[in-house]
Amino acid sequence: MQRVLFVTAALAIASFVVDHSISFADDWGTIKGSVVVTGDVPPQKLLVMKGNAAVKDATVCAAQDVPDESVLIDQKTKGVANVIVFLPKKPSKIHPELVKSKEPEVVFDQKGCQFIPHVLLVRTDQKVRVLSNDAVAHNTHTYPLKNKQENFIVSPNDRKGVLVPSVNLTERLPAKVGCDIHPWMQAYWVILDHPYAAVTKEDGTFEIKDLPPGNHEFKVWQEKVGYINNSYKVTVKAGSNDLEPIKVPVETLLK
């Protein structure tokens, strides 16, 4: 009898734990959306054409085409890459597993005289480690509004990298990053004190997980346009939320 009671109690506890975890998970919402253009998709522009001997460090920088990542539109889906969707202010409630960043550092790399990624999400409890996978020197020059500006050389093929600790203040706008040696190189750091931000993928899709349910006002930003939507209002329900595509006239991106 005691053994039966023990097993029954154990099953009840396990059931409670499972039910509690499911309930806990259901208290948060995930949004899924996309940014797409209306109109015909233009050919992809290049910043550097393969084999162009006139560019700086051509043996490395012109070893391949360098696309203009300020406007990347998928031919099939008409999705726009590198669009930033983010909450400008830290919400009062954050998922317990997201209160603190899981990784103390994020990596900002360089390959083929391009920054990788083109848009980097950084939280204020993280540092940025700048690497290079190119056989030529680069420099990283940051242009934040609140954080300390940085301007330093990254040695060829430096896989140890340079650590940037000065990203501890939330930036109102994405901070531009450039390379003064290779002036076509440009990227952006999105520095926030919370986890609720996303960058659209090559097909224009984005996902932001574990938001507190309720009404939220996001900003949608793209480097050629600025704010695509300065007040993107979304009602988040517990569970998965599929949003209507955010549509942008293709002419707007080509100005």
Image (cartoon, helix red, strand yellow):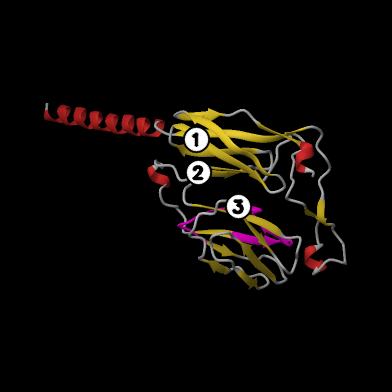
116 is within the stretch colored magenta: yes
Q: Badge 1 is on which residue?
A: 216
Asked which quadrant contains residue 97, the reply is: top left
* Of marks 1 and 2, the one in the foreground: 1
Query: Is the magenta region chiefly helix, strand or loop?
Result: strand
Residue at figure coordinates x 74%, y 69% from the top left: 181
Q: Residues within 10 Å of mark 3 (few under 14, many from 20)?
A: many
Residue stretch in magenta: 108-127
Mark 3, secondary structure of its residue: loop
Mark 2, secondary structure of its residue: loop
98 is within the stretch colored magenta: no
* Separation (CA) of disc 2 from disc 3: 14 Å
The answer to whether 114 is drawn above or below residue 136 in the figure is above
Q: Tag 2 or tag 1, which sits nearer the N-term? A: 2
Q: Badge 2 is on which residue?
A: 196
- Give residue 54's position: percent from left, percent from top: 87, 67
Mark 1, secondary structure of its residue: strand
Residue that sits furthest to the left in the current view: 1
- Give residue 219's position: percent from left, percent from top: 58, 41
The answer to whether 216 is drawn above or below residue 50 in the figure is above
The answer to whether 51 is drawn above or below residue 99 in the figure is below
Q: Quadrant of the N terminus?
A: top left
Q: Tag 3 or tag 1, which sits nearer the N-term? A: 3
> Which of the numbered marks, if any, corresponds to residue 174?
3
Q: Tag 3 or tag 2, which sits nearer the N-term? A: 3
